[in-house]
Image (tube, helix red, strand yellow):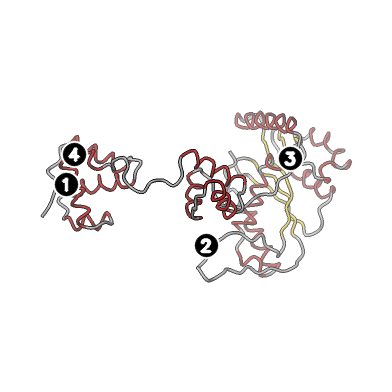
Amino acid sequence: MKFVSPLDTAEIISLQWMSREHPLPWSRTRANAVLLSDQQMPLQSVASVCGVSRQTTSIWLTNWEQDGICGLVDKPGRGRRKILSPDKETEVVDLIKASPRSLNKVLVEIQKRWGIKLSKSTLKRLSKKARLSWKRVRKSLRGKRNDEKFEETLEEIRSLMAQADRGDIDFYYFDESGFTLEPCVPYAWQEIGKTIEVPSSKSRRLNVLGFVDRECHFESYVFEGSVNSDVVISCFNEFSKKLNKKTVVLIDNAPTHTSNAFLDNIDDWEKQNLFIQNIPAYSPELNKIEILWRKIKYEWLNFSAYESFTALKENLNYILANIGQEYHINFS
């Protein structure tokens, strides 16, 4: 029965490091094979653990006995030569970025430029190597915003967050969101050949107005009717009654937040320690409560919530009542 010669402490430490940290997977596997053999594991068992043949494992052990660590590393020039040079790989990645929705178009361009025929799986490997991933493209209004105002507001928000961290103020995000029986259909793990179907139908709308801070302390107000400035003002009036220190609330520029009726109340709210911080137009990412709405719609609401308006109301109210306890987001 074949085993490696007993290993000394230095060899064991080197092989253990190699089995965990070496950048090449086969070198890690070979180092592990030597360690297993040193523990008197039979050759066939080592081969089974490593997923190779008995003969291959025997060759690894022989290489170790003859050349030590160097015998476990592939020699230069081994394996199939790369089809693309490093420079061409960089150009291919640029082509993928230029045509991110169609790898077939990239394959055609590669063959046209260099006469090289690649498979789509090769392009996918190059994409992953370049830290690209296939994911949903988002709609954005970022191009319409004023970047200078955005940066100024971002600095103001950072200052407010620092004051909140010191306990000088409380800092909240405010926004509204609506929920109906037409679900925001999420991604989900599903059996191949089967599809999860979520009920969908027209229904009344549940409007939720919410205040949330970075510790996920949450205050919400739910309405079945339409939300106008009077409704928003009423929510701010109720919220202001619960304050015990200066509180800044960040809001967007929705019409209900910029109406004369809303603006007429700002002086009274400031007397009650409630101050308003507006964000620039087309800057929704500054209002972190948007993350909360997405979590509710895409993750937290059960599929059964869409079976009836009553079920939707019960599920939504349960989630709203347990945000910060059972349902939590780290906004830091």
The kind of secondary structure element at disc 4 is helix
The front one of 120 and 160 is 120
The kind of secondary structure element at disc 3 is helix
Q: Is residue 260 above or below residue 187?
A: above
Residue under numbered circle 1: 62
Q: Quadrant of residue 69?
A: top left
The label number, if any, that marks residue 67 in the structure image: 4
Q: Nearer the viewer, mark 2 or mark 3?
A: 3
Q: Nearer the viewer, mark 1 or mark 2?
A: 1
Q: Cα distance, mark 1 to mark 2?
A: 46 Å
Specify the amino acid type for callout 2.
Trp
Crowdedness near tag 3: few (<14), some (14–19) or many (≥20) residues, C-alpha within 10 Å: few
Q: Are marks 2 and 3 in contact (CB under 8 Å)?
A: no
| Mark 4 or 1, nearer chain start | 1
Q: Cα distance, mark 4 to mark 1?
A: 9 Å
| Mark 2 or 4, nearer chain start | 4
Q: Nearer the viewer, mark 2 or mark 4?
A: 4
Q: Residue at x 58, y 59 (%)?
A: 187
Q: Cα distance, mark 3 to mark 4?
A: 61 Å
| Mark 3 or 4, nearer chain start | 4
The label number, if any, that marks residue 189 in the structure image: 2
Specify the amino acid type for callout 4.
Asp
Q: Cα distance, mark 2 to mark 4?
A: 48 Å
Q: Quadrant of the C terminus?
A: top right
Asked if residue 53 lies left or right of residue 274, the reply is: left
The label number, if any, that marks residue 171 in the structure image: none
Specify the amino acid type for callout 3.
Gly
| Mark 1 or 2, nearer chain start | 1
Crowdedness near tag 1: few (<14), some (14–19) or many (≥20) residues, C-alpha within 10 Å: some
Crowdedness near tag 4: few (<14), some (14–19) or many (≥20) residues, C-alpha within 10 Å: few
Q: Residue at x 72, y 38 (%)?
A: 249
